[in-house]
Amino acid sequence: MASDHEIGHGRNITWTLRAKQAPEHIREAWIGASWIVEMTADGIRDGKPFRATHL
């Protein structure tokens, strides 16, 4: 796990990067894949709460 905090351009966001074991449906769809990376952004953007998750 790694994280970074960004303040500027109307944002106050904490970015978090995690590696985790891929769920069964992903391992079945992509043979040989055993890990996935999850990136989350959580904080305030343009004065409003913001949360995004990308796999």
Image (spheres, rainbow, N blue to C red):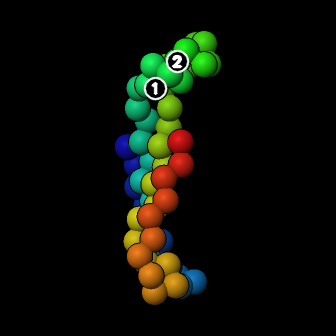
**Residue at the right extreme, as displayed:** 30
Q: Earlier in the sequence, mark 1 or mark 2?
A: 1
Q: Amino acid at mark 2?
A: Arg
Q: Is residue 17 left or right of residue 32?
A: left
Q: Amino acid at mark 1?
A: Ala
Q: Which residue carries the number 2 mark?
A: 27
**Residue 13 in sight:** no
The quadrant in which residue 31 appears is top right
Q: Which residue carries the number 1 mark?
A: 22
The quadrant in which residue 1 appears is top left
**Residue at the front extreme, as displayed:** 25
- Where residue 25 sits in the image (x, y, percent)? 50, 22
Q: Nearer the viewer, residue 26 or 10?
A: 26
In percent of the image, x 40 and y 71: which residue is there? 43
**Which mark identifies residue 43?**
none
Helix, strand or loop status at disc 1: loop
Helix, strand or loop status at disc 2: helix
Cα gap from disc 1 to disc 2, whole angstroms: 6 Å
- Where residue 41 sits in the image (x, y, percent)? 46, 61
Q: Please, is residue 21 above or below residue 47 in the view?
A: above
- Where residue 20 sits in the image (x, y, percent)? 40, 32
Count of marks, rendered view? 2
- Where residue 21 sits in the image (x, y, percent)? 41, 26
In percent of the image, x 44 and y 82: which residue is there? 48
Q: Please, is residue 25 above or below residue 11 in the view?
A: above
